[in-house]
Image: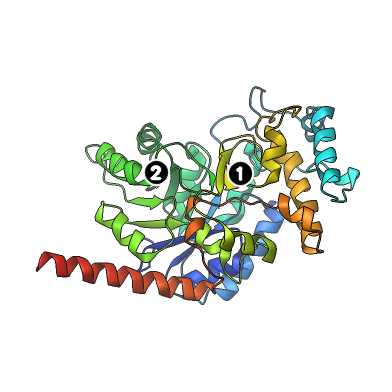
Amino acid sequence: MLGVDFPLLAFSHCRDVVAAVSRAGGFGVFGGARYTPQELEIELKWIDEHVDGKPYGVDIQAPEHSWFEGKERGLTLEQVVEAIPTRHRDFIASVLKKYDVEMDPAKAVEDRVPFAAPEVGEALMDVAFSHPIRLIANALGIAPPSMLSRGRAHGVPVAALVGAKEHALRQIAAGVDILVAQGTEAGGHCGEVSTLVLVPEVIRAIKPIRSVPVLAAGGIMTGRQMAGCMAMGAAGVWCGSVWLSTVESETSEVFRSKMIEASSRSTVRSTFRTGKPCRQLRSVWHDEWEAQGSPGPLPHPLMGMISMPAFGFIEKSAQAGNPKAKELVSYFVGQGVGLVDCVRTTGQVVQDFKQEFADALEDMMAWTHA
């Protein structure tokens, strides 16, 4: 279906990682939801030129419902910005000041249409389908009819991420071609069910309805884990966090060093970054928001509109050598961070996956003949 022999799908916001994974025999999936249509065009054109003709995919957000929780569609960007309370802006300013992070008040709020706006999703699809992609994934809710119809017209499978059995059943009814069963161990937005339970539960639930490949996701950092997921019935795996510690990743050296130091208990599933439950590396940012006097999280996407600029200031200060800013540094990462012990190239990670996968199969074959 995807044109690869080794079903290791790599989700990344970094085009270098996507191209490197596909060149190495896996399947890179570019996270395009953070980009404007014009920016996405630039990124995909670059991937086309550097992927050596290998297949790759795109992941965007095309929401089923209104992107502004509790409000009707049609709000202007100015109205959205006005909906952000002054006390939340002031609270972030006070936290950054406490950790000696310089902040530009004029850039304290994300000043473009939120990524999850329906019109943005449609425009991103226009760009994505103009490139030779082999997969398009919807990361937010039910894949919209326009994505499914365009996928069929272009011969491009449509994938959807699910975190619960009922979500999978709804996606199957909608007509998606591939399911990504993502457990709570995953980085970013995730549900509450573990990968070990979710994958077989989804496979069992959809089997009587329609034959759809299920990819396992959530906490998968090694080829042996990949083999285990496929032993459960998964058609392959979808990984994100493992690429964050690579040389090519979009993450900073400061964050990569924190990944190496972290344990599997160093993450937190919190709403204090995007407004929705989202797993990330715990830092004093979360301590401050959980402390008495905090105004509490804003709904999605308002929380992200004030946290993203803040983390931009934090990263800049940390990389400039501010030790207090380093305490605030955080990013979306799963519990598998505890398995990160060094920085590798993306190509090496793929090769390690292949070797570990082969070792696991060899071990299992030995057991069957014991």
Q: Amino acid at mark 2?
A: Val
Residue 329, placed above or below residue 141: below
Provide residue 172's location: percent of width, then percent of height: 35, 38
Front one among 58 and 282: 282
Colour pattern: rainbow
Residue sitting farthest toward the left: 369
Gap between marks 1 and 2 measured at Cα? 17 Å
Query: SS class of the residue under badge 2?
Result: loop
Percent across and percent down for residue 158 are 44, 49
Closer to the N terminus: mark 1 or mark 2? 1
Q: Of 4 and 258, which appears nearest the observer? A: 258
Task: Tell me the SS state at disc 1.
Answer: helix
Q: Quadrant of the N terminus?
A: bottom left
From where the camera sits, is residue 131 visible? no
Q: Which residue is mark 1?
A: 121
Q: Position of residue 272 (x, y in %)?
A: 66, 37
Is residue 163 toward the left or the right of residue 290 in the image? Answer: left
Residue 8, above or below 325? below
Name the residue located 51 percent from the left edge and 41 percent from the top edge: 146
Residue 70 appears left or right of 75: left
Q: Residue at horizontal 63%, vertical 64%?
A: 257
Q: Is residue 327 left or right of residue 333?
A: right
Q: What label does residue 224 carry, if any?
A: none
Give the residue drawn at x 56%, y 71%: 343
Q: Mark 2 — residue? A: 176
Please say whether residue 92 is visible from this viewpoint: yes
Kindly identify the amino acid type of the residue bearing the numbered disc 1.
Gly
